[in-house]
């Protein structure tokens, strides 16, 4: 029987929290959202958030490069900015005007940036310049997930998962959900995807279904993460709940909601599962971030 404890819920943001990213240490992470603030948190002292950047407009995506200490931040409809976390300086800005930025990922020296209409911008990490534009369908690019053998899985608003190689060549595609694919994780030779249809689905790397789709939430599932030991999944939904699942069987184990655990009062937009004491972190439309201990 899993034991759930809400360690803390803390604020600081003035708007919805849309993005979370792991930080330079196991006990640190970043948050961002509609207020344009990028905040660094320390799970050892969770109430002491530090603003590392203030950007005009919403932030839906960011990713931390542990090799350089630079946090790549997507400023919606403006471009991508590099924040050197050590001294909080903005070391570069790459203009991508009039393009929504929904997702970002780093693979093999490149930053993949997902936009509307199936467009992906690939940025050379070292040169900090646009290297290539990729077209992946016609729908919004919602998520990335790095796979083995230098492949990237891409989830889109048309319900498709598409696989690209590191050389940006398309490999395969399949219809995974009846609507948007919002999040994908990879673990033990299989992918887990979630989306607007509120189902969890499991796939092999060829796009073959490994399990029946599980109707997991009442409304859209915005995010899925896997526990550090690979045993559990956590999903966060527009229905204001976080659910914990057995990864192998997709059996529901716990529901974290406001009534029972003092959880979020609005949509859960993003989760990260830290290796620091296996703490689960959630960000929500209610402007708050919660930290959960799951044993």
Image (cartoon, rainbow, N blue to C red):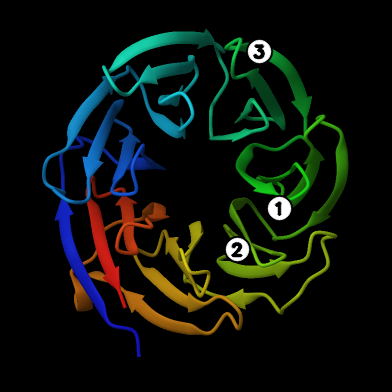
Q: Secondary structure at mark 3?
A: strand
- Residue underneath mark 3: 130
Q: Quadrant of residue 84?
A: top left
Q: Is residue 264 visible to us here?
A: no
- Residue underneath mark 2: 197
Position of residue 199 in the picture relative to residue 225 (left or right)? right
Q: Position of residue 118 (x, y in %)?
A: 72, 32
Q: Position of residue 171 (x, y in %)?
A: 88, 44
Q: Nearer the viewer, mark 3 or mark 2?
A: 3
Q: Quadrant of residue 213?
A: bottom right
Q: Secondary structure at mark 2?
A: loop
Residues under labels 2 and 1: Cα distance? 9 Å
Instruction: Give yes or no for contact between labels 2 and 1 (Cβ–Cβ under 8 Å).
Output: yes
Give the residue displayed 61% in from the left and 77% down from the top.
214
Q: Nearer the viewer, residue 212 or 91?
A: 91
10 Å neighbourhood of mark 1: few (<14), some, or many (≥20)?
A: many
Q: Outermost residue, bottom direction?
A: 1
Give the residue displayed 36% in from the left and 39% down from the top.
23
Q: Secondary structure at mark 1?
A: loop
Q: Position of residue 158 (x, y in %)?
A: 71, 47
Give the residue displayed 55% in from the left and 66% down from the top.
198
Give the residue displayed 34% in from the left and 84% down from the top.
2
- Residue underneath mark 1: 159
Residues under labels 1 and 3: Cα distance? 27 Å
């Amino acid at each position: 029987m899993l034991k759930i404890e809400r360690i803390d819920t803390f604020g600081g943001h003035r708007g919805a929290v849309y993005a979370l990213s792991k930080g330079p240490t196991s006990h640190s992470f970043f948050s961002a959202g509609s207020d344009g603030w990028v905040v660094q948190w320390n799970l050892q002292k969770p109430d002491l958030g530090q603003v590392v950047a203030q950007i005009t407009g919403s932030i839906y995506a960011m990713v931390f490069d542990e090799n350089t200490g630079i946090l790549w931040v997507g400023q919606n409809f403006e471009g991508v900015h590099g924040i050197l976390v050590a001294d909080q300086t903005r070391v570069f800005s790459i203009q991508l005007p009039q393009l929504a930025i929904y997702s970002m990922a780093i693979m093999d020296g490149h930053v993949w940036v997902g936009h509307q209409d199936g467009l992906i911008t690939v940025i050379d990490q070292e040169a900090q310049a646009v290297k290539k534009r990729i077209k992946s369908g016609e729908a919004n690019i919602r998520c990335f997930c790095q796979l083995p053998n230098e492949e990237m899985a891409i989830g889109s608003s048309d319900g498709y998962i598409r696989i690209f190689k590191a050389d940006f060549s398309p490999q395969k595609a399949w219809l995974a959900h009846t609507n948007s694919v919002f999040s994908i994780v990879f673990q033990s030779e299989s992918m887990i995807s979630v989306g607007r249809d509120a189902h969890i689905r499991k796939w092999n790397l060829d796009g073959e279904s490994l399990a029946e789709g599980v109707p997991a939430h009442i409304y859209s599932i915005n995010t899925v993460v896997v526990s550090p030991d690979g045993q559990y999944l956590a999903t966060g939904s527009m229905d204001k709940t976080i659910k914990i699942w057995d990864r192998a069987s997709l059996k529901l184990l716990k529901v974290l909601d406001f009534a029972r655990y003092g959880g979020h009062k609005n949509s859960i937009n993003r989760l990260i599962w830290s290796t620091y004491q296996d703490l689960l972190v959630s960000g929500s439309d209610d402007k708050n971030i919660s930290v959960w201990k799951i044993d």
